[in-house]
Image: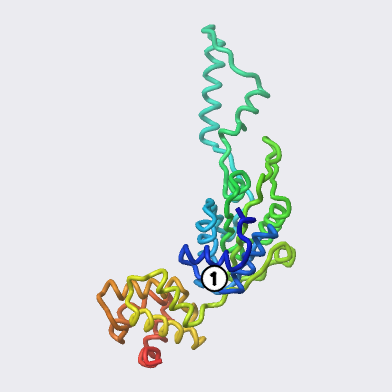
Amino acid sequence: MEPSITSAAQLAKLLRATGYLADDALATIGFLALRLGRPLLLEGEPGTGKTALAEALAEALEVPLIRLQCYEGIDASQALYDWDFPRQILHLRALETTARIGVDGEGGNGPDGPDVEKSLFDERFLLSRPILRALRESPAVLLVDEVDRADDEFEAFLLEVLSTYQVTIPELGTIRATVPPIVILTSNRTRELHDALKRRCLYHWIDHPGLARELEIVRSRAPEVGERLSRQVVSAVQAMRRGGELVKPPGVAETLDWARALMELGASDLDVEHASATLGVAVKYREDADRVRGSLDQILGG
């Protein structure tokens, strides 16, 4: 899979075919991550295309995308595996019924204690969570999304898995990835990640795209939107970001949504009336909406 990609330019071309436009720096670090077999850590503001890169990479390489969404309090069992407790209970009751029939003299013969325990932790009752799935189903892209939301303990667990690409399940033994998955980690930098995890990964910071590249993205991902309207939406979003006063500046996803929403309303131009009516598509905080509405003339004029 990865060895067939021989250059950063080839990777960029494959990603472009999926609708993801990677600049030279991102294509280069992505290519190196594939060839060196190293996880790729992407940091940047929300909406800059970190998650979308993993999705595009899986599509370009024609492999499954397995996503682990991190959150506060996530632990190893929620990322790795768990046991299907309800099915285990049903199985245990079935064994008890079999044993009881045997006691009643109807020919039943239930298993003894050690065999019962072994049968409860059989492969069929194992629930594979994203990391275990990635190890067993690879080649695949494993997306560890918003790793900065997890705590230090989970980060340490993740580092161990990424160092060996294997996990041990006490009841079943050690499971190793035949082919290590392609691992993409994303962070919105709500907290600093530990140096040990960063050293394990290749790193890239993704900025919001410039006007020309964002316009190209809109043309690629939303070709149904007219050229004039696309340029006006992108220019307006770029002006919002330049101010630096918004709690959460619009990302590329919001740019695309805004352009599509305006098209659905039949707008051919982004004027103050349409911009004000659809502002909730682009900005998601009340304070941001108030700031933008107060300067729409200037934003649209710019």
Q: Residue furthest left?
A: 266
Q: Quadrant of residue 44?
A: bottom right
- Residue nearest the viewer, comparing 131 with 20: 20
Say left or right for 111 vs 250: right
Q: Quadrant of residue 74?
A: bottom right
> Can you give x and y, in whole percent of width and height, for residue 167 in the image?
69, 45
Three-letter amino acid code of the residue under disc 1: Ala
Q: Residues within 10 Å of mark 1 (few under 14, many from 20)?
A: many
> Can you give x and y, in whole percent of width and height, for residue 260 in the image?
34, 72
> Can you give x and y, in whole percent of width and height, for residue 151 in the image?
65, 61
Q: Residue furthest top?
A: 105
Name above or below for residue 53 compared with residue 277: above
Give the structural element (helix, strand or loop) at label 1.
loop
Identify the image quadrant of the C terminus: bottom left
Say left or right for 62 vs 189: left
> Can you give x and y, in whole percent of width and height, for residue 174 in the image?
71, 40
Say left or right for 163 vs 21: right
Q: Residue at x 32, y 72 (%)?
A: 261
Q: Residue at x 51, y 61 (%)?
A: 56
Q: Residue at x 53, y 9 (%)?
A: 104
- Residue nearest the viewer, comparing 97 with 266: 266
Name above or below for residue 147 compared with residue 206: above
Q: Which residue is mark 1?
A: 22
- Residue nearest the viewer, comparing 129 with 114: 129
